[in-house]
Image (cartoon, rainbow, N blue to C red):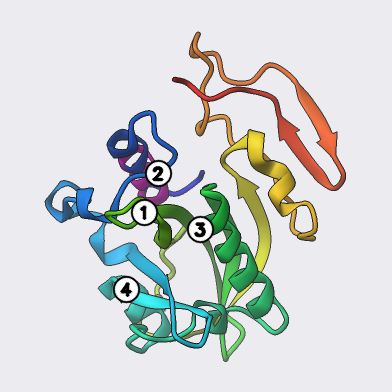
Amino acid sequence: MRSDTTTELFRYWNTIRGKRELPRRDELEPGDIRVLLPNLFILERDRAAGISFRLAGTQICALFGQELRGRQFGMLWLGSQAAKTQRITGLVMAHRVPVVLSANARTADHRAVEIETLLLPLASSGGESDRVLGALSPLTRPYWLHSTAVECLDATGMKILDPDRSAVFRDEPAVAQADPMARPSAEGGGYSAARQVRHLRVLEGGRSR
């Protein structure tokens, strides 16, 4: 991960989940991540069987020049990427696997800035994975940021943060790779080997227990 915001949120999510697959949403303490809140969001399945924003931080809304609560997450993405992004987000929920999406945020007047989006599964109080906790963060701060609205996100890559579940995304055409930050080995040395799973390059490693 390249963004401090996504890195810190991932560390927080890992801390509160402990040895479980994912934390419960009632375990989130906004005060613990107050610095990150402007760039955070929560997604949920809506009545139309889509995935929409339940909450969106002020910096994310400013980036797009509109309030995002209630809007479909896929509508932020370019063309056919809308359906693909919705599907990927659904897989994050269903299979409880964290993912990072890389993209260029594009304006109507052809300006662009690289962004990183982190998608983390989040459980209800009963343990059902029915939410996504996320972060959306620009990687640079051009002078026009937040004064010229972004029109869409143009995806450039996908990174799977759990190598043991890479097969879940085997039909997605995005570039996907396990992140050595996600599942360090018991010795703290990361992953030692790599293998090819169809179009995915997966770094071998296990989950710390």
How packed mark 1 is, by other alpha carbons closer than 10 Å (few <14, some 14-19, many 20 or more), is many
Q: Which residues are magenta?
A: 5-12
Q: Position of residue 29 (x, y in %)?
A: 16, 51
What amino acid is found at the position of numbered circle 2 in the picture? Leu
Of the image marks 1 and 3, the number of the one nearer the N terminus: 3
Query: Mark number for residue 93?
Result: 3
Of the image marks 4 and 3, the number of the one nearer the N terminus: 4
What amino acid is found at the position of numbered circle 4 in the picture? Ala
Give me the residue at 84% from left, 48% from top: 199
Secondary structure beneath disc 1?
strand
Give me the residue at 28% from left, 38% from top: 16
The CA span between labels 1 and 2 is 7 Å
From the image, tell me which residue sits under label 4.
56
What amino acid is found at the position of numbered circle 3 in the picture? Met
Q: Are marks 1 and 2 in contact (CB under 8 Å)?
A: yes
From the image, tell me which residue sits under label 2.
22
Q: Position of residue 131 (x, y in %)?
A: 40, 63
What amino acid is found at the position of numbered circle 1 in the picture? Ala
Secondary structure beneath disc 2?
loop
From the image, tell me which residue sits under label 1.
123
Where 177 falls versus 65 (above or below)? above
Q: Is residue 35 magenta?
A: no
Report whether residue 76 is seen. yes
132 or 59: nearer the viewer:
132
Q: Nearer the viewer, mark 4 or mark 2?
A: 2
How packed mark 4 is, by other alpha carbons closer than 10 Å (few <14, some 14-19, many 20 or more), is many
